[in-house]
Amino acid sequence: MKGRIACSADRLSLLEAAMISSVVEPNAFQIGKQYQTERRVQMTDASDTELTSSVMGNSGLYEQTIRLIDGHLEAKCSCTLSEPPICRHGVAALLEYQRWSTSRVVPKPRVTAPRLEPDRPTARAVSTDDLKLSELDQFTEWMQRVLQSIQAGHPVPEQPNLGPGLVSAWTQVIQQMDERRRESEVAQVELDADIRSRDAAVARLKQDLDASVKEVQSLQGICRDLQREVTEQKVAASKTADVARQIEQFELEVKTIAGLLTEKGRRLEGLSDTCRDVSSMLKSLGKA
């Protein structure tokens, strides 16, 4: 998306967080601030009037180009969000540029605060001149309590009542880091529990696998025994077939012999009849 807004600043470093939040959508500013806090911004090139960067959003990596030109602040991002005039990625890039510019130890002349249109009340630029000895003392005492709380595993104590400035920004950063630390601890506990659960599931699966392997081995032994039995049955069936053929051959031979005996029996009956006839004739001749 592209955005353009009137701006009286002549350097990008003069654009404070409060000034940016006054002209962008609240949701875009909050998400952009979260991106910058989570170190998702990578500046590729920066000058007093131009900034190029890339931001890792929730849906991918997007590139930004922000310029101060002809009294206007022009912001361009490769995302397709509708968050005029500056999207969340551009906000994150500007906030990261502000952090980067304030971290450099370079004397800066006092200048008249610029304005972004529409004109709204803005906060004073934070510089090293805002540091006060009393605030540093409070910060030191608070840091001692922070160390004691961290060693005891307790949350960081509430920050001291400080005015806007570097010391207040330091305390906010430390609190944010402690919040992320505690969130990481909770996530680590959940991760450890998930790992233990997965280890138990893996152990159960391994036991099931071992049991399955043993069952497969037992089934393989049974299959080998069945194969041997099948082979033996095939051999026995082959022998039975040979015996059946021999029996059929014997039956044929018996039928042949029976036929021969029947034929001889008929012949013998014929001879017997002839003998009876001859005997009758002889008897008749004897009587005569």
Image: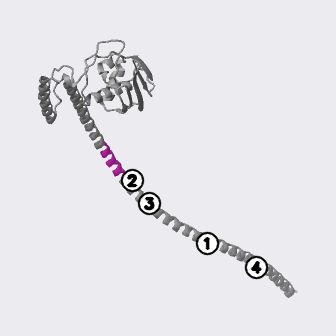
Report the magenta stretch's main SS.
helix
Where is residue 59? Give x, y as percent: 41, 31
How far is the residue under mark 1 from the one under mark 3? 33 Å
Horizontal relation, residue 85 to residue 287: left or right = left
Q: Earlier in the sequence, mark 1 or mark 2?
A: 2
Select label 1 or label 3 by which is in front: 3
Q: Residue at x 64, y 71 (%)?
A: 245
Q: Which of the pair 36/178 is nearer the observer?
A: 36
Mark 1 crowd level (few <14, some 14–19, many ≥20, 10 Å Cα) = few
The amino acid type, in three-letter code, at marker 4 is: Lys
Q: Residues within 10 Å of mark 2 (few under 14, many from 20)?
A: few
Please tell me which of labels 1 and 3 falls first in the chain: 3
Q: List the residue tagged with mark 1.
A: 242
Give the vertical position of 34 relative to 239 (above or below). above
C-alpha distance separating marks 4 and 2: 76 Å
Q: Is residue 116 above or below residue 102?
A: above
Q: Residue at x 78, y 79 (%)?
A: 267
Front: mark 1 or 4: 1
User: Marks 3/2: CA distance?
Assistant: 12 Å
> From the viewer's perspective, is the residue at label 4 or at label 3 nearer?
3
